[in-house]
Image: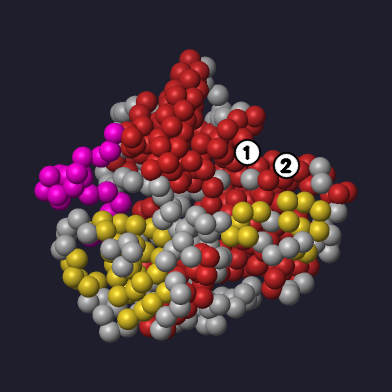
Amino acid sequence: MSASFLSIDPGTRRVWLDARNPGFFENPNRSYAELHASTPTFFWEQQQQWFFAGYDHVNSLLRDKRFGRQILHITSREALGWPEPPAHTRHFDKAEEWSLLELEPPEHTRLRTLVNRAFVSRHVEKMSGDITDLANRLIDGFEADGKVELLSRFADIIPVTMIARMIGIPDEMGPQLLKWSHDYVGMYMFKRSRADEEAADRSAREFADYLRGIIAERRAAPREDLLSQMIHTRHRDQFLTEDELISTTIVLLNAGHEATVHQLGNSVRIILESGFDPSTLFADAATTERTVEECLRICAPVHIFQRYCLEPCEIDGVCLKRGDKIGLILAAANLDGRKFPDPLTFRPERNDGANLSFGAGIHFCIGAPLARLELNIVLPLLFHRLRGMKLASTPRVKDVYHFHGLERLDLVW
């Protein structure tokens, strides 16, 4: 089985897949379907590591304590044969040092416990009014035009504004936060270049410098926000250090909006292309929730979560040693026909179980309740206020794999 960008050898489970080819990144679901049909566990030649796409494997490996987001807590670079980290990413590496996404217990448990209470559903739901007000105000700004580029005028703004408010950062910082975040997440893309690394490092330094000033202000004059809570709350008789505060705040800001922007655009597109009547998709809270979950399943914004093997083991016939890195393709797991029948079809009435778009296990996305709330409020509001909305042109997908989002989304009504 092969295409200009994909070649699969089921016998050896070797896959040649060009992630930069538009044939792949514009519609990765088709390639995932081919992988499921041939070899959902495979060695990706370009990445030189094993990947898992089956739902059961991805779901279990996300929870498997034999794998972790870091490995230097149990061994050394020398033992693994790793070189020293490059100097040109030292500010980025420093900002990631205490990231919730990169830590394992006990440090992960300590930091997550401190911030988790702010993201539980009952607390997040208090933001419903602010989300609704902001969405209505933004729509007021373009409704009479009969057209809009939805990402820049709407989708970019809502998630970054709401997570910034939650943490305690002024609304006017939104555009700067977006720039820092876009540069920062460039480190996780398959197209990463030296220029991307330097941009990420520069933005990490600027981001951290800005946060030091805000942290100093909140130390002197606490407010009713998450940053003040993190600064002034003890956990096991310890306060967070400044480095821990910076890493945690950066990951919350980035994770709290970057994927949601992609998901808003992806969801509007899939709904408009599905042929479903939006009034039936958003008839009530229950149908809205099912529609949102189906959008998350079929057009997830984050496709891969990587983990290190912490001890020798065998998974699906693949022998792994300590230090090996594996890739878990969340978006492909959502398309496993053994879990989700007719997986490439948008079926909002599904009741097949949970998708893995937010991950699972101890690194389950801490911002999931906020993202789900935003989607459940904003999507029905858009389709209710902009009746007759349709695509003005075929949307262009960004070359940013392993994220999945649009360059722009032009709509008319």
Task: Name the residue tied to disc 1.
Answer: 161
Residue 165 visible somewhere in the drawing: no
Q: Which residues are magenta?
A: 63-87
**Would you say 180 lies left or right of 231 here?**
right
Judge whether 39 appears above or below 406 on screen.
below
Viewer-proximal residue, 303 or 1? 1
Q: Residues within 10 Å of mark 1 (few under 14, many from 20)?
A: many
* Residue at the (48%, 41%) spot, across then down: 183
Name the image quarter holding the N terminus: bottom left
Q: Magenta: predominant secondary structure element?
A: loop
Task: Name the residue tied to disc 2.
Answer: 134
* Residue at the (52%, 43%) spot, across then down: 182
Q: Position of residue 208 (x, y in %)?
A: 43, 28
Q: Position of residue 84 (x, y in %)?
A: 21, 40
Per the model, the C-alpha gap separating discs 2 and 1 is 9 Å
Name the element at disc 2.
helix
Viewer-proximal residue, 353 or 243? 243
Q: Position of residue 72 (x, y in %)?
A: 21, 45
Judge whether 91 appears above or below 41 on screen.
above
